[in-house]
């Protein structure tokens, strides 16, 4: 008794694909490497990309081209040579993915305005610092509030140098001391404005930082679920059956 035929929607259907001689030769080479026929190789590659949208296909194509350039430079395959793998890993983090990054802070007019305001404040203070330096007061660290340091997304300011600056000014001759005191006072005023400007910029940039951190948490959650599913299916093997990209430090 013959096997019942599948419904038409479940049957594999042939399509005509025209390839350049170069692409056909490359696919034939990859088919031999994988032990598949040319038709099976084309089907496998088409199936792998069938569900993704066009921007993702463009990204994958760009990444594939970058991998080929890296392998051309190293003369080795990324999955067989650690140095080449490291170059590909760096490219995946710092390369084409950044060309497709949405919602850039630099495109936000409020952030641009806040940065410009901060630079104007910095520019207003610079000649004052230079004059104090000529008087022998300001060193390479300046005399104002030290630049902002980020600690878990919060602002923190290093201790300022103004007490040292005033002490140094007190040791100058009377004609220079008055000018130095006036300069330090003016720098203090600009410092306070600069702190406000930095805090404003930091607040405007925070949604972008939070969104990126949320994305990293999403990746870790998806990755953990995949690892957990492999442990359920292969309890005695643990992560060893998981795809390589999901293994490693958690």
Image (cartoon, grey):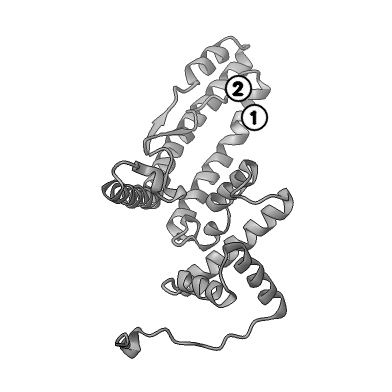
Q: What label does residue 16 carry, if any?
A: none
Residue 200, compared with residue 2, is above or below; it is above
Which residue occupies the foreground of this view, 31 or 173?
Answer: 31
Q: Which residue is mark 2?
A: 138
Q: Where residue 149 sits: x, y (%)?
A: 45, 32
Task: Look at the image and tell me in which quarter the C terminus lies.
Answer: top left
- In percent of the image, x 51 and y 27: which residue is there? 144
Mark 1 crowdedness (10 Å alpha carbons): few <14, some 14-19, many ≥20: some
Which residue occupies the foreground of this view, 221 or 184?
Answer: 221
Mark 2 crowdedness (10 Å alpha carbons): few <14, some 14-19, many ≥20: many
Q: Where residue 156 sits: x, y (%)?
A: 39, 31
- In percent of the image, x 41 and y 37: which residue is there? 249
N-terminal of the pair, mark 1 or mark 2, is: 1
Alpha-carbon span between mark 1 and mark 2: 8 Å
Residue 107, compared with residue 23, is above or below; it is above
Q: Where residue 189 sits: x, y (%)?
A: 46, 33
Residue 168, compared with residue 122, is above or below; it is above
Q: Name the image quarter holding residue 143.
A: top right
Q: Which residue is mark 1?
A: 130
Which residue occupies the foreground of this view, 18 or 216?
Answer: 18
Disc 2, SS: loop
Disc 1, SS: helix
Task: Look at the image and tell me in which quarter the N terminus lies.
Answer: bottom left
Residue furthest left in the image: 232
């Amino acid at each position: 008794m013959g096997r019942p035929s599948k419904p038409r929607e479940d049957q594999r259907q042939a399509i005509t694909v025209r390839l350049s001689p170069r692409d056909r030769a490359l696919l034939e080479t990859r088919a031999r490497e994988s032990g598949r026929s040319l038709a099976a190789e084309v089907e496998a590659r088409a199936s792998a990309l069938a569900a993704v949208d066009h921007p993702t296909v463009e990204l994958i194509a760009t990444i594939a081209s970058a991998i080929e350039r890296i392998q051309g430079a190293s003369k080795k395959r990324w999955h067989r040579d650690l140095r080449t793998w490291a170059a590909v890993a760096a490219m995946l983090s710092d390369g084409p993915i950044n060309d497709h990054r949405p919602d850039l802070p630099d495109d936000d007019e409020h952030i641009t305005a806040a940065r410009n305001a901060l630079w104007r404040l910095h520019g207003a203070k610079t000649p004052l610092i230079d004059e104090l330096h000529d008087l022998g007061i300001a060193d390479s660290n300046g005399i104002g509030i030290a630049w902002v340091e980020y600690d878990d997304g919060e602002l923190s300011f290093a201790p300022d140098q103004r007490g040292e600056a005033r002490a140094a000014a007190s040791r100058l001759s009377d004609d220079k001391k008055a000018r130095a005191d006036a300069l330090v006072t003016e720098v203090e005023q600009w410092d306070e404005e600069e702190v406000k400007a930095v805090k404003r910029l930091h607040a405007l940039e925070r949604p972008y930082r939070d969104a990126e951190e949320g994305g990293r948490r999403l990746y870790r959650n998806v990755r953990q679920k995949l690892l957990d599913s492999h442990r359920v299916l292969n309890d005695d093997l643990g992560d060893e059956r998981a795809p390589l990209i999901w293994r490693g430090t958690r």
